[in-house]
Amino acid sequence: MNSPPSLRNLPVEDARARILAGAARLGVETVALEQSLGRVLAEPIVASRAQPPFDASAMDGWAIRRADYARGEAFAIAGESAAGKAYPKAVQAGEAVRIFTGAPVPAGADLVIIQEEAVREGDTVRFEAGETPKANIRPAGGDFRAGAVLLEAGVVIDAWRLSLVASAGLSTVPVARRPRVAILATGDELVPPGQAPRPDQIFESGSFSLAALIQAWGGEAFRLKAQVDDAAAIAASVAPVEADLIVTIGGASVGDHDLVKPALRTLGLTLAVETVAVRPGKPTWSGTLADGRRVLGLPGNPASALVCAELFLKPLLAALAGADPTIALSPARLVAPLSATGPREHWMRARLEVDAEGRLTATPFPDQDSSLIGVFAQADALLRRGGAAPAAQAGDIVEVLPLRRG
């Protein structure tokens, strides 16, 4: 059963749009604040109170009334205001209250003289702060006010946003459910790491790297047992899997042993993408099974699979979590010349550096063979070149997709 020509050799953007079609947040769950790191926020975070909730001292020093301030005048020490232990009274004329950073400014006071500009003499204190000293007071609501939207739905909770949520007083956070992703590698040539391969076999590596990427990109990954080139075995492996997305590796080209699509057609596969006009990764495909599970087929060559995971799998996971699936490219200055490209869009593994003038530079690796895992392990970016692009010279500006490392 052949697919329509309109599904073959799709431009990258068109293929991505088809893969993302209908992808939306899968659901919402509430997790403890400390478990929300890396999760996608499902609902806006709204402040229930101001931060700080009171005028707070920005420095260690003395709280007084500015109207009473005069250079060299002595003030009676009335008491102390510390963080969590506010001075309970209003400051009266001629009084000074010892105050510490973050402590509430007592009622009546509107000036904090820093301790380095104060001289204490028994029960009094006088100041040498100049004619118009700085107030050194953080106003109530200076960070945010009650009712303010602190974070919008769809952002990923990082350490800084986690602090903001905590400062709003929330102990639980509504987050998007993580997409469940099953990974199936296929091929007679594959043997698991740790086992003894035959001379005509290789170690299966793709499912391990994809599982790690899926976890880093906010999904829940689980690896299925690799299957030989047998359509019935492939279909039987996928049929009972409870997952939102099934990612297959290999078996996606046009050879006699490329049986993944025929196997999944027995499960009602409807194709959205047959092939993509991209190098590496032309055999990448996508579709949906009869029960609604999505399928993304990646090529068997490791570099092809990893490039297309960045281009298609990562944005799909973002969409399924309710986050922005946009791929953000950065400009960089090309270090070495490149020849003209063929008709397919080309994503080259490259190394990024900052030159002496502070400019981002990109050096593509000379060998871009799609079977080379070692090159990918050294790369920290993918360099994009459009289809039918002319030769590029050193110094030209190119687009790069930085790769997340660590």
Image: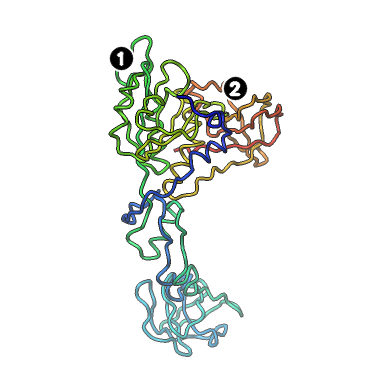
Residue drawn at 63 percent across, 39 percent down:
360
Looking at the image, residue 393 sits to the left or right of residue 308; the answer is right
- The amino acid on which the numbered mark 2 sits, given as a three-letter code, is Pro
- The amino acid on which the numbered mark 1 sits, given as a three-letter code, is Ala
Give the camera-side residue of 78 and 157.
157
Residue drawn at 41 percent across, 36 percent down:
288
Crowdedness of circle 2 by 10 Å Cα count: few (<14), some, many (20+)? few
Q: CA distance from mark 2 to mark 1?
A: 33 Å
Residue 196, labelled with which disc?
1
Quadrant in the picture for the C terminus = top left
Nearer-N-terminus badge (2/1):
1
Total residue callouts: 2
In what element is the residue under mark 1?
A: loop
Quadrant in the picture for the N terminus = top left
In what element is the residue under mark 2?
A: loop
Write down the quadrant of residue 87 in the picture.
bottom left
Residue drawn at 48 percent across, 70 percent down:
58
Give the camera-side residue of 235 and 167.
235
Q: Is residue 209 above or below residue 60?
A: above
Residue drawn at 57 percent across, 83 percent down:
71
Q: Position of residue 132 (x, y in %)?
A: 60, 79
Looking at the image, residue 327 sits to the left or right of residue 270; the answer is right
User: Which residue was labeled with disc 2?
Assistant: 366
Q: Position of residue 355 (x, y in %)?
A: 64, 37
> Which residue is most to the bottom?
93
Give the camera-side residue of 258 and 73.
258
